[in-house]
Image (cartoon, rainbow, N blue to C red):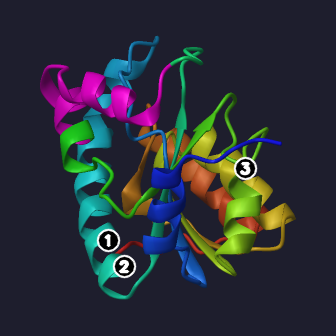
Amino acid sequence: MRSTHPWLLERARRRPLQPSPTVLVLVDFINPMDFPGAEKLLKSARAAAQATAQLKHRLARRGVVAIYANDNYGVWHSDFKELVAACQQLPGARGEIATLLAPGENDLTVLKPRHSAFHSTPLDHLLQQLKARELVIVGLAADMCVHLTAMDAYMHGYRVWVPGDCTAAESEASKATALGQMARVFKCSVRKSA
């Protein structure tokens, strides 16, 4: 039988998960952006992060839980706090975004191995524990990880809102195409955050 450390039990008693019918899912904002095309993505990522920070603040006042779903970049022995700290040290927009959107004490985190926040992660189980019915999905990139997360959310039966101004892609055309498909095929709202 596995023993549980007393400090873990005490922490769980202090902060049990409260129901959150709406959940904000932040996809890959904490990101070193060291891949081909990252410079193009950075142009709109900063504006998306600023809009997301404002939206997150408004939703938090309503009691909406935030879950960060982030790539682990193949480093399985790291944790999310290490990833945030490393990204915050990066120069320019990379560090600014990680600082602006650093998770708060009550935010939840999920490391994902692939593009969708649902694939091979405990996200759906966590959403069930929160009694979530609607997801607000924001992040990078609109035409890849956000798109695939929205698709999986739709297939899992969640109502989905992808605020267009809280996403970024390497080009405005790619972003517009992805948002259009999310609206048309996955029945997502893509209205702006404000």
Q: Secondary structure at mark 2?
A: helix
Q: Relative to 190, is 40 on the left or the right?
A: left
Q: Report, in whole angstroms, how far the alpha carbon at label 3 lies from the one at label 1.
A: 24 Å
How dense is the environment of label 1, judged by Cα within 10 Å: few (below 14), some, or many (20 and up)?
some
Of the numbered discs in the image, which one, if any, rests on residue 118? none
Task: State the extent of the magenta-drawn residues as a range.
Answer: 78-97
The amino acid marked with disc number 2 is Leu
Q: Taken as a whole, is the magenta stretch helix, strand or loop?
A: helix
Residue 189, by quadrant, is bottom right
The amino acid marked with disc number 3 is Pro
Question: CB under 8 Å between callouts 1 and 2?
Answer: yes
Q: Which residue is mark 3?
A: 122
Q: Which residue is mark 1?
A: 55
Q: Is residue 29 visible?
A: yes
- Quarter of the C terminus within the rendering: bottom left
Q: Position of residue 43 (x, y in %)?
A: 27, 34
Say which label, 3 or 1, has the lower sequence index: 1
Q: Report, in whole angstroms, how far the alpha carbon at label 2 lies from the one at label 3.
A: 23 Å
- The residue under the point 53% across, 74% down is 16
Q: Is residue 60 above or below residue 114?
A: below
